[in-house]
Image (spheres, rainbow, N blue to C red):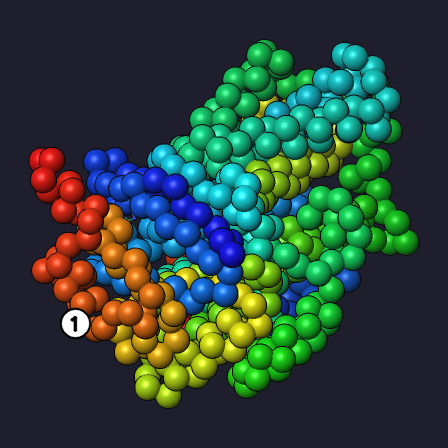
Amino acid sequence: MTLLSLNQISKSFGGIHALQDVSFDLNKGDIVGLVGDNGAGKSTLIKILAGAHDPSSGQVILEGQAQTLSPPANAQGLGIETVYQDLSMIGAFTAAENFFLGRELALGRGPALFRLIRRKTMLDTAVSGLEELHIDIPGVRSKPVERMSGGQRQLVAIARGAFWGSKMLLLDEPTAALGVRESKEVLNLITRLSARGLTIVMVTHNLEHLWSVCNRVVVMRRGRKAADMPSASTNMEDVVAYITGAKEGLQGRALELTS
Amino acid sequence: MHVLGTYGTILVLILMVVVFSAIQPDTFATVGNFRNILNDMAIGTIVAAGLTVPLVCGDFDLSIGYVASFSGILMVGLLSANQLPIPVAMLIVVGIGMLIGIVNGVIVSKIGVNAFIATLGTGTVVVGLNYAYSGGIPLQLTHSTDFTGLAIGRFLGIPHLAIIMVVVLGVLWVILNRTVQGQHIRAIGVSAESSRRAGVAVDRSRIVAFAIASTCAAIGGVLMASNLGSGQVTAGDGFMLTSFSAAFLGSAALREGQFHIVGTLIGVLTVAVGNNGLAMIGAPIFTQYLFAGCLLVLAVALGGIGRRYGRG
Ligand SMILES: Nc1ncnc2c1ncn2[C@@H]1O[C@H](COP(=O)(O)OP(=O)(O)OP(=O)(O)O)[C@@H](O)[C@H]1O
Ligand SMILES: [Mg+2]
């Protein structure tokens, strides 16, 4: 069943075409691996799905309805959560505070100015949220995340996404800069989250990580979709060939013929 | 270095209290003198504490001094020329202050003008409004002369100004540390983009922060008018510099290189105690400026060190 479709999504920054006419369908339960060279447009695509960027043109259809995903609070409201490549948490805040940033549990109604934070309840909820995902990190209540290790921070960020996301979780290079053991932990968590019904899009440069969890591969090249295949019916050499351009997608070839 | 960056300002404060008390036990270390210090610093503290809110959010506000001046003039004008009841006049003045803050916030967040330039611009416009309203001439309080009782009276021996200061500080502390809005303002101060991505209404929060600063500046202006018993055209202008000094001094108190309400209070208190003590021992006026200026540079340098080494 199709959860979300992208129709001819383009995004430019000034003269740079970061994305051009990208279309694909995400099925419920997919774990999609999004790969491509540096600057291929992976993060831009993630940010469009996250509502952090408005597409320059094109359409996003979620469960049959055209939706505007930006600003991020909109996408979040629709059940889409994101772990960004950078700037995903407030370093000076604790894991618990980051968990609830933008969605604080509070007493009272009305403007944010008059709502008192329920610190204790937020702490307890964040701790039990992490426990439920079998993530064991010391100092969730008191340690600023900037003092955690990269792996711990990544687990907290993913757990936050899992805690709030009801439909989709977008992960931009969740295993970058992580050691072997930490990567394994993150990949395990991704598999568990998928089993709970979340649809996942994961950007990675590590094809082994991709093969260990993803059921589909989407290859980006120079802002266009170069390939989109079930991971069972392809192999690493093929994917690498699409990434480098040694092998070209239909779209690319058609374009080259016309130009 | 870490200790100095975090506790530097407080150490200076304690040191001064000890030294001045030792030199002048009969004049400096008295309840009466302490009451004087509190009374003298109250209005400046209110304006500085208000400024602290946009500073926490990462924004400068250069208009607060001019807003305070204009508010004082307008207050006296509304009472004397228009003969409005005191509460009504106060509501109008503080409301206009808040409105100026909202305008600041909209220009900075929605239009994207650098806060430094935007508030310099609005501040200058406010000076223009001030002169348009007053003609550049001080206004005398001709009606509602009991308005002076607001700032000058005492309650159970405590100056009204000190009580109002404590209330404003308390409210601002609760806003920054215990409300959803405060949590958002502090998050934006660390990273506006991360906050936006987390779903925080960044623009609205910045507008609220500017509105709070400007509202406090207006309250300061009203109290100043009450204290002076008249409207002086430029009486509040100096609050801009003293407020920034206090807030930066306070950033080297208790928390490594961060702005916060208690820090700002300590900042104002340090300068006030220094000036008072220097006057008590008979030091010439110029020493007060030397002291305040050197202290500021030193504290911020140390606070910066605290900020850099504190993260390790
Ligand atoms: N905010 C921006 N302003 C201008 N150009 C941008 C912006 N964001 C991305 N780009 C440009 O868009 C293109 C795609 O960038 P994107 O970040 O999506 O690449 P990526 O595939 O995620 O690369 P990486 O693997 O290095 O993370 C690049 O040329 C980049 O310079
Ligand atoms: Mg990227």
Seen in the image, is A179 located left or right of residue B255? Answer: left
Seen in the image, is B218 located left or right of residue B204? Answer: right
Point 58% across, 79% down: residue? A133
Taking depth in this image into account, of B289 and A69 the one nearest to the observer is A69
Taking depth in this image into account, of A15 and B247 the one nearest to the observer is A15
Image coords of residue B61 (percent x, y): 50, 39
Seen in the image, is A61 located left or right of residue B269? Answer: left
The image quadrant where one finds the C terminus of chain B is bottom left
Residue A175, located in which quarter of the rendered image? bottom left
Q: Chain of mark 1?
A: A
Residue corresponding to mark 1: A237
Q: Residue furthest bottom?
A: A181
The image quadrant where one finds the N terminus of chain B is bottom left
Q: Is residue B140 visible?
A: no
Point 45% across, 64% down: residue? A30
Q: Residue furthest front?
A: A233
Q: Secondary structure at mark 1?
A: helix
